[in-house]
Amino acid sequence: MKRTKRRLLWAVFCCIAVLSVSCASVDYIADAPARVRAADWGTMQTVTVAMQEFAYQPSELRFTAGVPYKLQIRNTGMMKHYFTAEDFFKAIATRKLQSNSDGEIKAPYFSAIEVFPDRSLDLYFIPVTKGTYGLHCTIEGHELHGMSGTIVIE
Ligand SMILES: [Cu+2]
């Protein structure tokens, strides 16, 4: 009986441990606002990615951790497209998302960015967690036709 109880307790403990590890991995960069304030935006690098039917160009984006960036996400296609990269968005400190004609949105993180045809949005951010992250368009059929890519933070 005692042994069964101990085993049960151990199983519960393991479940909690696994849950807390998986919960930790879904966290966004908690101190993003402090990182954004501390960064020297005068050294900002500009990178452009074009979205069209059915690809990202380039299909691999590389960023250096700690460097402030402006990522211009341009839709050069005829259809609307998504820049969906949830794990990447969790690995960066986001300053803002800016529309060049309408204004800007300040938020600690995003999960997906949709850009209409012939439009562009600029993401201002600092890469934080090194790794390789997936990028894809979540509109039905687009990824199947090749609309996916890779984002590397090194
Ligand atoms: Cu698409």
Image: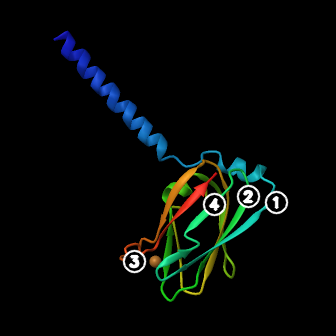
Q: Which residue is mark 4?
A: 62
- N-term mark: 2 or 1: 1
Q: Which residue is mark 3?
A: 145
Compute the Cα span from label 3 to label 2: 32 Å
Above or below residue 118? Residue 137 is: above
Provide residue 40's location: percent of width, then percent of height.
Answer: 81, 55
Q: Comparing marks 1 and 4, which lies closer to the viewer?
A: 4
Whether residues under marks 2 and 1 lie with C-beta atoms below 8 angstroms apart, the answer is yes
Residue 109 can be seen in this image: no
- N-term mark: 3 or 1: 1
- The amino acid type found where label 2 is placed reads Pro
Q: Comparing marks 4 and 2, which lies closer to the viewer?
A: 4
Whether residues under marks 1 and 4 lie with C-beta atoms below 8 angstroms apart, the answer is no
* Label annotation for residue 68: 2
> For numbered disc 1, what is the local secondary structure?
helix
- The amino acid type found where label 3 is placed reads His
- N-term mark: 4 or 2: 4
In this view of the protein, which residue sits in the foreground, 46 or 150?
Answer: 150
- The amino acid type found where label 4 is placed reads Arg
Badge 4 density bin: few <14, some 14–19, many ≥20, Cα 10 Å? some
Q: Which residue is mark 1?
A: 43
- N-term mark: 3 or 2: 2
- N-term mark: 3 or 4: 4
Q: Comparing marks 3 and 1, which lies closer to the viewer?
A: 3
